[in-house]
Structure formats: C-alpha cells, structure tokens
Image (cartoon, rainbow, N blue to C red):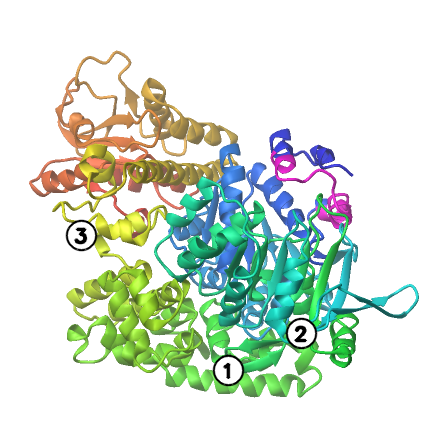
C-alpha cells in the first residue's frame, strides 16, 4: 500500500506530499493494517503493537494530523521530555506551515500550558506528568479532546514511569465521556488482560520492514547467532578481529564499518559513552566536514560536548547521553541523520527517546546503572530489543545487524539464550512497587474521582494493578490496608481533611498544591517547613537548596558531594560561564540544566505554598524571580529572551551585562532597536535570528488562540464565520467583524459602525449604561508587529458622536507594544477612560456569552468599566467572573 492511498482517509494531498518528503512512500505492514482497520476509523479504542523501527509511530502521527485537520483537538502523550521536544519541533516544522497549531508541555516547556488548558491548539504534545497535573487543575482538558494518543505504553510496567501512567489511565477510564484512545507499544510478552482492562481492540504485527540479524560477538570476533529454520546455533567470525577488552573490540568493529554506513553503540553509563567515544576518535580515519557543520558546533555554548565535537567530529564520532543539553542533543541527532556522524556512542536512553535508525547496532553492556538502587542491574530483554531494533534504515538498506558483546564463547551462548531467544517481559502493574503510594491517593481525592476510603478502594480495584497483582496477593484487603495507611499520611501532612458532616475526605488548599506539584509527600512537607522558617527572607538560593538537596527529586540527579548542588546553582544563577561550571564539577551542560529545572520545579511549588500561607509579598517576589533564574541561568529581566530558545545563554547574558553599557530587557525594545544598536553586544546575524524569533512567537501565539476559538465556535456555523473574520480580517473588514460579533443575537449590544469615517472619528460605538462606548479597531499588517502607543491612543481623540463617552476601547491584534501597555496604566491612573483589548480576549468574552457562561449584561459592564490592559487573560477573566 502506497502512502498516496491515505487520501482515501480524507487527508489533504499537502500532508501526503509532506510525508513523501520525509521518506514515507510505501506503508509498512503495521501501518497498512492500522489505516485499513474499520474499528480504528470508526472511533474505537485501539492498541497498536509492533517491533521497534516497524513504523508504528507514523500511525500515531497520521491519526493526529487527520483529527487536527478536522478541527478536533488531539493530545499526544509521550514518556520523556526529550521525545516531546523532538515531536514538537518536527510537527511544528512540517505541519505548522500547513495550518495545524502545535503546542508542547513538559518539565522544561511551560509556555503553552494556558493554551492547553483552554484548548487553543490542534495537536498538544505532553508528557505523562503534565497531563496528570492538568487533570487535577483542569479536568476539562480531556473533555474537549477528541483523540488521545499514548506512545510507549509498554512503560506501564516500569517503576519510574508506570505508576503515574497507570493512575492517569485509571482516571481517564472512569470518566463519563472520554476521547478515542490510541495506544502505541513495542512488542511485549503477555498482555495480562491490559486490552480488556481498557476495552481495546488490538492491531499487531511482528514484521519489521527491514529484517534484523542478531549476533553475539566475543572478544576474538567470533559471532554466534540462531538459525530459526534449522533450530540451531550458527557460528562465524569477523576477520582480523581479536581484542583484549571492550574498547579494543569496539574500535576494531568500527574500523570494519563499510563506507556510507552508520553505527549506534550502546554503553551502560554516561562516563563510558564519553571515554569510549574518545578512544574511537583516536583510532578512526578522518572524514570531511562542511563549513555549515563546523559553524553549527561553534554556535553551541562552550561546554565539554562542544569541546569534544570540535576536536573529534572530523573522525565521524560523537556521544549522546544525559549530560548533554537540549541544543547539543538536537545538533548531534541532526548530524547523525545527515550522515556526518558515522559512529554514535549512547546510553540506552536514546533507544527509548529518540528515533535514530542505523545500519548496525552494538549493545556493549548487559548491565546499566539504576539510580534508585544506586548499583548496576541487568537490562531487560525488552530494553535489549529496543536497542537492537534501531538497526535497519527503512528505504535505504535491505537488512540491519545488531551485535551483543560477550567476553567468550560460554558467555556468548548465555547472552544469546537470555536476550536474543528470551521471552519479552509481560505487561504488569508497577504500582505495588511504588514507594510513595500516598501521592497517588492524594491525586485521586484532588481530582474528585473518590472522596471516601471505600470509593478510593473501588477505584484502585479498577486499576491494572488489581488484574496483575492484588487479585493474586491479598486482593481487596491488601488494597484497603495500603489506602488506609496513605490516608493517615496525608492527614498528618495536612493535605486532606475529614468533612465530619458529609463523612468524606476532601483535599485542603495545601493538598491541592501538593496534588498539582507531582512531587513526593515527603518533599512537599520539607517545602512547607522551609516556607515556615523565620529567616526565609535572608536565605539565598544556595541556603534554600542546602535544605532540599537530599530530597527524592534531587537525589536522583547525577552524583554530587554534599553541598555541591546548592553551590552549582548559585554559580548558574550568577551568570558564571558554563565552561567554568562544567570544569569545576566535572559534569556536562545538560546536568547543569537538569539541576536548574529541578530547582525551578521545587521553587515554583514553594512559591505557591508561600502565597497560600500569607508570606510577605516581597519574599514571594524574590522566590518567583529565583524560579525563572534557576531554570534558565540568566537574569530575570531577559527570561523572555531565553524562552525563545534561539540564543546561547552567554549571548542572552550579554544583552544586559556588556562593555557597551546598554541593557535590552524587553522583546519589543529589541524589535524596535536598529541592528547598529547591538554592535559590540551581539553579532548582526544573531540579531536577525533573535528578531525573527520574536516576531514568529507573536504570530504563533495569535494563531494558537485563533485555533482554539474557531474549534469552540464550530457548534454554531454562523458563529464560526464571525470568529474567523474577527481573526483574519484587516481594515474595514476587521471593523465589520467586531460589529457583527457584538450584534449576534445572543449578545445584541446594538453596536454601530461609522460607514463614512472622517479623521479621528470612531470606528464603532455602542450604547452603555453610563454613556457611549467608543471602539477603535487596529490590526498589524502581518499579525506579528505589536500595536504602538500612538495608534492605541488615537481613540481618545475620537469625535463624531453625541453625548457622554463612558469608555474608549482599542481592539488590537495581535497584541500591544510594551510602551503602550506601560502608558495606558499611567493614563488610567490619572483618571483617563481607556482600555486596550486584545482581539483574543474579545473573542473569549463573546464566546462565553454565546456558550451561556457569561451574561450579556456582564459583557457590557466589562466593556464600559474595564480600564488599562488585560495582561493575563486567565487571571483577569477569573476576577471578572467573580
């Protein structure tokens, strides 16, 4: 079946062309099975099972695009933030220009959270933890979603990801209305009724589009594999290979790599990937590099990874591990995909989180580091299969080869039997292994899914854990004892309380913050004690983290000596160069970023606790600034620049700390400044990149809001036209769109547009309770440039109406300039009547009236009495409703 045939599913040819350009021409077996399956097309819940590199991820991608093009909202759930970022970048690049609004939410991506809560997106990509938080804070997230795709569902059995994923699915399972569910999984052992638990139909395939030859290779180059036809071992040899250790064996295997082929080598630990990569770089022949590639490496922040690439990339070697920062990982992945890296050394995290197929794969170790047990443990069969399955480049090779390394013939036979011939692990619940069971009980109560001990027990009996564990070991009694103990813990922590009148457990305000946080109950209690300290106002970030560095969420990070984490954070926030920090602590740039993000995570929760407990506002402001500085490692004033993700940290710091005595602390200020104004501060090419990113960000934000409002207006066709016109039109047509929306029968504000406007006459007027409301409409030509103060204030000089004006409003799109926002607050404080109203806020207000959430009279009152500028739609709208 050719990819062209997807047009039969009602998919626009533009998307099929985009898939062709990505290399999808002929569909694989699992793809053909899925796209021709009547149950999937009819909206039934489906579990897709297929081996690694079989093309199952493309199934999810096509279904997400199809739904988004039908103006349905899609949530695409992945386990790792690296995978979320990869999909976001890929989907945005491919589908953004074709009209699909793509957003992402993960541990280090929060800028789209409001859009996801409000439904302003076509495809929302998020990780397990974030969706769990959304369901506590905004349960409607699932209610307005028509399709939920969950990738790597086999991780439900793992201790680190499984319990959260299972509780998330249990909550969704019990919702009265839910979206179509599509689960994607690598091949697994027994399902243990997982499909029956969620009411899933199975679409599966054991076929790989590229056959895989699996070998065990010992130090002498002897190869052992299994002949499934003859049911016997096959032995062969890699010629001229005889090694004394793993590094020597890897060098000799790499030297045998044919020209034009690429190889992934998986090692157990981060330091082994770097050490072995250096050994290979000293032994392999050089390869030519393009000037573009050399420059892309120089554009990275100075760090150990950049140093390695500058020294060794011409050997075609690199490493990929948890010590890399996001931009380092993305560059290395891009260079590998384009063939400039021939041998990539990695930990097994790459196999689970990034799609990088190779010609050959080497699994060098069968033990990996367990951060919880803090020791080496044997890898599972599924982990080996996931690594080995990366061998085989679809559309480019006829087969792939994987090599599992052994010391001698005896060990080779053991490894072959265990990993190549071994049974994949069955799906089972990891909840019984969860050390912080109370956290999940709190989530259930905070979500409103259960409020008594009996109800909580019933919910957990409805979980996958009941099928795979509790029914065999203690049944309901074991569940009840665990829940009783968890409830006691939550009561002692002040996170839930008993309502004596109703006889139910209810979450306290403090407990709601804990449920949203995602951290352990013990760590949350530590944060509460920290906020209660009398010397909190004088504590530095270093002092704060000396109190927290042994909590579970920080102890899982890379090993540090006592006090090192807090010292590192202090240097990070102070603006110390990355090179100096990495040298002092002997870690990668990514480790610094991980620590900074974890610091932000805990500090954000601490700020929420402080607000609830009435801590002095100056302390809250100080900690709020620290959260952003900890995340990005830059001064608070330029955090918006860092959020654009286009400049290096050192370049961002240079915007406010430079020898020229200048300071750029506003995105609009940067847009307004002539390139010559950045001489001595930022390279001209980088100035262009920055300005383009600012304009693009404004435009993308505007487009996301449009998408959400258009989808909401779909239920009433005439309203959809009004919303589209409001967002898309300019000039007189923009004025007409405002007039039409305010006069739709559910609103009926009797708005009247001046058809023959002379200089300084208003565009629209409508009768208020205190006088006439005067409205001016202003839209930028490209919907990216903000509305200036001069343009925004023109409405104040409007003439051509009789009577008293009760308010002057400028409706602008996409947004107003910083100076306009600053000035409008100043003039309204002096008593002037002026409101700068973004078009998305006007659309939100009108849609709420049409949907019955807001009275027509409240909308009129808002338009007549609101002054200034709505800086945060969510906060101001909530105040308005109250």
Instruction: Say which element carries label 1.
Output: loop
Q: Position of residue 548 (x, y in %)?
A: 32, 78
Residue 270 image label: none
User: Residue most toward the left?
Assistant: 830
Instruction: Mark 3 vs mark 2: give the one in front.
Output: 3
Looking at the picture, does residue 592 appear above or below residue 876? below
Looking at the picture, does residue 319 appear above or below residue 457? above
Label located before the other in sequence (2 or 1): 1
Question: In terms of depth relative to the viewer, which is nearer, 308 or 198?
Answer: 308
Pointer 2 local density, CA inside 10 Å: few below 14, some 14–19, many at least 20: some
- Residue with the mark numbered 3: 657
Residue 380 image label: 2
Q: Residue drawn at (17%, 19%), measured in percent from left and top?
A: 801
Dividing the picture into quadrants, the one containing residue 25 is top right
Label located before the other in sequence (3 or 1): 1
Q: Is residue 83 magenta?
A: no
Label located before the other in sequence (3 or 2): 2
- Residue with the mark numbered 1: 374
Question: In terms of depth relative to the viewer, which is nearer, 269 or 238?
Answer: 238
Taking the image as drawn, is residue 664 in sight? Answer: yes
Looking at the picture, does residue 880 appear above or below residue 457? above
Q: Which residues are magenta?
A: 18-40
User: Residue most toward the right?
Assistant: 230
Q: Quadrant of the N terminus?
A: top right
| Position of residue 257 in the picture relative to residue 862 (left or right) | right
The reply to whether callout 3 and callout 2 are in contact (CB within 8 Å) is no
- Magenta-drawn stretch, dominant element (helix, strand or loop): helix
Pointer 1 local density, CA inside 10 Å: few below 14, some 14–19, many at least 20: few
Q: Is residue 28 magenta?
A: yes
Q: Position of residue 451 (x, y in %)?
A: 49, 74
């Amino acid at each position: 079946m050719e990819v062209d045939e997807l047009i039969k599913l009602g998919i626009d040819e533009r998307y099929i062309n985009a898939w062709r350009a990505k290399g999808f021409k002929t569909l694989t077996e699992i793809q053909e099975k899925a796209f021709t399956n009547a149950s999937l097309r009819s909206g039934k819940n489906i579990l897709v099972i297929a081996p690694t590199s079989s093309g199952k991820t493309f199934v999810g991608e096509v279904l997400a695009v199809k739904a988004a093009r039908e103006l349905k909202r899609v949530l695409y759930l992945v386990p790792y933030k690296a995978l979320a970022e990869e999909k976001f970048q890929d989907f945005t690049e491919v589908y953004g220009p074709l009209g699909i609004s793509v957003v992402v939410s993960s541990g280090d991506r929060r800028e789209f959270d409001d859009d996801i809560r409000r439904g302003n997106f076509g495809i929302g990509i998020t990780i397990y933890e974030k969706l769990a938080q959304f369901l506590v804070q905004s349960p409607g997230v699932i209610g307005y979603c028509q399709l939920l795709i969950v990738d790597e569902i086999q991780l439900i059995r793992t201790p680190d990801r499984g319990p959260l994923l299972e509780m998330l699915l249990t909550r969704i399972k019990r919702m009265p209305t839910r979206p179509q569910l599509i689960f994607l999984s690598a091949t697994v052992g027994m399902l243990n009724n997982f499909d029956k638990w969620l009411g899933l139909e199975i679409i599966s395939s054991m076929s790989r589009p590229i056959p895989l030859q699996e070998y065990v290779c010992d130090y002498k180059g002897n190869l052992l594999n299994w002949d499934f036809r003859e049911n016997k071992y096959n032995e062969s040899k890699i010629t001229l290979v005889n090694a004394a250790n793993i590094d020597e064996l890897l060098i000799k295997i790499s030297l045998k790599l044919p020209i034009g082929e690429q190889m992934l080598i998986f090692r157990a630990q981060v330091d082994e990937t770097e050490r072995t990569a250096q050994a290979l770089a000293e032994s392999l022949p050089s390869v030519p590099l393009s000037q573009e590639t050399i420059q892309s490496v120089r554009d990275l922040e100075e760090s150990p990874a950049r140093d390695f690439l500058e020294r060794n990339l011409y050997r075609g070697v690199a490493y990929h591990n948890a010590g890399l920062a996001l931009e380092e990982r993305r560059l290395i992945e891009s260079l590998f995909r384009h063939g400039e890296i021939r041998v990539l050394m990695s930990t097994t995290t790459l196999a689970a989180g990034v799609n990088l197929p190779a010609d050959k794969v080497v699994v060098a170790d069968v033990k990996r580091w367990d951060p919880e047990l803090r020791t080496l443990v044997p890898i599972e069969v599924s982990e080996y299969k996931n690594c080995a399955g990366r061998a085989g480049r679809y559309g480019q090779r006829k087969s792939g080869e994987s090599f599992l390394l052994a010391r001698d013939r005896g060990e080779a036979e053991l490894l072959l039997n265990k990993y190549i011939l071994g049974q994949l692990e069955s799906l089972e619940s990891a909840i019984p292994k969860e050390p912080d069971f109370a956290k999940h009980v709190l989530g259930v109560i905070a979500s409103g899914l259960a409020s008594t001990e009996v109800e909580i027990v019933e919910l957990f009996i409805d979980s996958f854990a009941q099928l795979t564990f509790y029914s065999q070991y203690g049944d309901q009694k074991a569940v009840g004892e665990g829940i009783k103990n968890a409830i006691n813990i939550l009561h002692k922590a002040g996170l839930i309380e008993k309502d004596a009148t109703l006889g139910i457990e209810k979450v306290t305000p403090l407990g709601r913050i804990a449920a949203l946080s995602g951290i352990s109950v013990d760590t949350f209690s530590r944060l509460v004690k920290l906020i209660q300290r009398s010397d909190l106002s004088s504590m530095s970030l270093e002092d704060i983290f000396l109190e927290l560095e042994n909590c579970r969420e920080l102890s899982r990070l890379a090993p540090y000596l006592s006090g090192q984490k807090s010292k590192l954070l202090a240097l990070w926030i102070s603006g110390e160069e990355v090179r100096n920090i990495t040298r002092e602590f002997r870690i990668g740039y990514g480790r610094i970023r991980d620590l900074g993000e974890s610091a932000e995570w805990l500090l954000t929760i601490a700020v929420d606790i402080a607000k609830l407990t009435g801590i002095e506002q100056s302390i809250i402001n100080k900690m709020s600034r620290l959260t952003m500085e900890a995340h990005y490692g830059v001064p608070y004033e330029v955090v918006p620049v860092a959020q654009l993700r286009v400049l290096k940290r050192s370049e961002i710091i240079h915007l406010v700390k430079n020898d020229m005595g200048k300071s750029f602390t506003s995105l609009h200020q940067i847009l307004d400044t002539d390139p010559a104004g950045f001489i001595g501060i930022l390279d001209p090419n980088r100035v262009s990149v920055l300005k383009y990113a600012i304009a693009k960000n404004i435009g993308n934000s505007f487009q996301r809001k449009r998408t959400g409002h258009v989808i909401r207006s779909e239920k009433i066709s005439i309203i959809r036209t009004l919303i589209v016109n409001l967002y898309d039109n300019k000039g007189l047509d923009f004025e007409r769109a405002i007039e039409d929306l305010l006069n739709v029968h559910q609103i009926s504000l009797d708005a009247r547009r001046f058809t023959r406007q002379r200089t300084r006459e208003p565009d629209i007027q409508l009768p208020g309770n205190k006088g006439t409301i005067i409205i001016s409409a202003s839209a930028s030509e490209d919907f990216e440039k903000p509305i200036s103060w001069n343009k925004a204030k023109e409405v104040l000089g409007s003439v051509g109406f009789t009577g008293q004006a009760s308010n002057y409003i400028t409706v602008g799109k996409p947004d107003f300039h910083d100076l306009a926002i600053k000035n409008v607050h100043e003039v309204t404080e002096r008593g002037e009547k002026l409101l700068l109203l973004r078009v998305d806020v006007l659309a939100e207000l009108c849609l709420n009236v049409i949907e019955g959430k807001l009275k027509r009279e409240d909308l009129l009152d808002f338009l007549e009495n609101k002054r200034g500028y709505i800086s945060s739609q969510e906060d101001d709208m909530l105040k308005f409703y109250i």
